[in-house]
Image (spheres, helix red, strand yellow):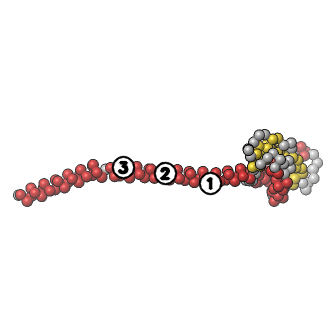
Amino acid sequence: MKRNLILLIILVLFGGSAWGYYNWVYSEYPQKIRQFDRTIQLRDEKLISAQIIHQQLDLVANLIEKNLAFSKSDSLAEIASLPFINYVTGILEELKIDMNKLEPGKKSARLDYVRVPYTLTLDASYQQLGKFINRLEKSERLITVEQFEIDNAIRKSGAKTDKTQDRSIHEIVLKISTLTLIKQR
């Protein structure tokens, strides 16, 4: 009988200590682990955000560097800048777009930037126009598409037209401008 009583007391002590350990000591560990996991997740998100911002800042710094002039008379800020015209005509040739006219407009200079407008008259399809604007958008220069007009040739369809003429080709007047940042002293 004594043996059974001692065994019961040991069993109750062991069970009570296991219950106490589980409720007072062990219960804090999963909560702390969940808290640490959440902290690690938040820090990982911040690290990823910082890496993305760093990469984008590199792109922004490159964009500014490519469009920064030291004065308003710099070659980037010139009317009819030859590198820009070569860039545009290269894209047009690559996309097989006919350019009828490229006319630089009047340069407008502000304190911290210079805007040079251009008017292009093109013969292109809608797809070619979309690809051309997409390529301009991806340029390292700051280029703004101000306005475009598409002559959809409805007037021509009623009149006698050349049957060999491609009806998907439209006359497009595209007004774009380049922005050149002026470095402040």
Amino acid type for the residue under numbered disc 3: Gln
Secondary structure under the numbered disc 3 in the rendered image: helix
Q: Residue at x 72, y 52 (%)?
A: 65
Q: Earlier in the sequence, mark 1 or mark 3?
A: 3
Q: Tell me the number on the disc at residue 43.
A: 2
Q: Is residue 38 above or below residue 7?
A: above
Q: Is residue 68 left or right of residue 33?
A: right
Residue 121 visible? The answer is no
Identified by mark 2, the residue type is Arg
Q: Which quadrant would the N terminus be assigned to in this image?
A: bottom left
In the picture, the disc for residue 31 is 3
The CA span between labels 1 and 3 is 36 Å
For numbered disc 2, what is the local secondary structure?
A: helix
Instruction: Label 1: state its secondary structure.
Output: helix
Checking the image for residue 67, the label placed there is none
* Residue 126 image position (x, y, % from top left): 79, 50
How far apart marks 1 and 2 lie (CA) works out to 18 Å
